[in-house]
Amino acid sequence: MQIGSMDNQAKNTKILVTGAKGQLGSELKIISAYEPYQFVFVDIEELDLTDGTAVNAFFNTHKIDFCINCAAYTAVDYAEKNKEAARAVNVDAVQNLAEACTINNTFLFQISTDFVFRGNTSLPLTEEIEPDPISVYGSTKLEGEIVAMSTNPRTLVLRTAWLYSSFGNNFVKTMIRLGKERDELGVIADQIGTPTYAGDLAKTIIEIVKFAQENGLDENRGVFHYSNEGVASWYDFAKAIFDLKSIDINLKPLKTTEYVTSAKRPQYSLMDKSRIKSTFNLQIPYWRDSLKNCLELLED
């Protein structure tokens, strides 16, 4: 394909981003200003994904080439008592999107989570490991994965973990607030994974879109893992935030058993990114470097 025709193809490519007001959706909106694609951003006010009729009507009106589903019920602890609400967004809405994508030959990016795993291993999680969720949130997200891939063959499931951003509510903003309010704070030190900057994830998704336009994606569907590089506990994550922000606080490491929550969390959710890096030729930033970039944006 010649460069000119590639540019025209990009200009004629329409990308739907659902959950536009969330962390990942907001980061994609920032990136969209610098990309040639036609982006359509919707949140529940513009399109209720749990309404199948509305979703089909929307797809009939807009010719969508790629759908990036960032919409999700992410209130992990509330989901334990609100299973139907979580299922409506994490499963039923995905079913509606996947059906519309199938009818319209749209490629679907379904964003998922490390919570589909039990987290009782000590090795990085590959895509071949059998999911075994231990929370309602994790169970509904796994159902969403299965529904998406079984309904629409042109689906790429992208699992990520410990997402944060300069947008929305997240661990980074909470730590900064608590660090200014308190002299002492306890943070869990025995849950292991990797913080993931939503800005990096957004860039990765757009890189995969570009790859699809040049090479096709039919042979590269299925499940992929993405997080930033490196390893950390939540305690390490908090310590890095306080160090980079020069916040003086007595930070104490806690065991999971000392901080009881409604939903169980995976103890170990370090992701193996070998597949996504080799398939799409990606360079993934180290988590501390990305954290520093995010904190600088928050200051601005």
Image (spheres, rainbow, N blue to C red):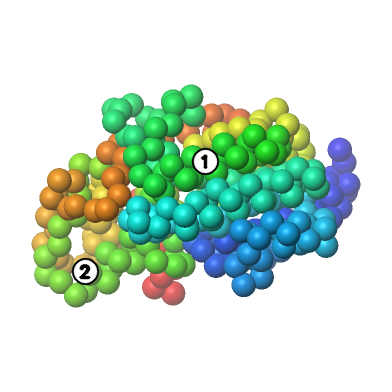
* Residue occupied by mark 2: 179
Q: Nearer the viewer, residue 68 or 31?
A: 68
Q: Nearer the viewer, residue 242 or 266?
A: 266
- Nearer to us of marks 1 and 2 is 1
Residue drawn at x 38%, y 38% as measured from the top left? 133
Quarter of the image for residue 293 reads bottom left
Work out whether 274 lies above or below 143: above
Q: CA distance from mark 1 to mark 2?
A: 37 Å
Q: Is residue 171 visible?
A: yes
Residue 199 seen in the current view: no
Task: Give the position of the C terminus as an image quadrant.
Answer: bottom left
Q: Amino acid at mark 2?
A: Gly
User: Callout 2: helix, strand or loop?
Assistant: helix
Residue at x 30%, y 49% (from the top left corner): 263
Q: Which residue is mark 1?
A: 143
Q: Is residue 173 left or right of residue 61?
A: left
Q: Quadrant of residue 78?
A: bottom left
In front of the other: 280 or 256: 256
Q: Amino acid at mark 1?
A: Glu
Nearest to N terminus: mark 1 or mark 2 = 1
The residue lying at 32 percent from left, 34 percent from top is: 119
Give the image quarter of residue 102: top right
Image coordinates of residue 225 in percent, x first then y, are 49, 37
Taking the view exactly as shown, the residue that stands out farthest to the top is: 128
Q: Dot 2: few (<14), some (14–19), or many (≥20) neighbours within 10 Å?
A: many
Identify the residue at horizontal 82%, vertical 58% (top origin).
Answer: 60
Q: Residues within 10 Å of mark 1 (few under 14, many from 20)?
A: some
Q: Quadrant of the N terminus?
A: top right
> What percent of the width, then of the height, locates residue 123?
33, 26
- Give the structural element (helix, strand or loop) at label 1: helix
* Left or right of residue 174, residue 220 in this image: right
On residue 201, the disc is none
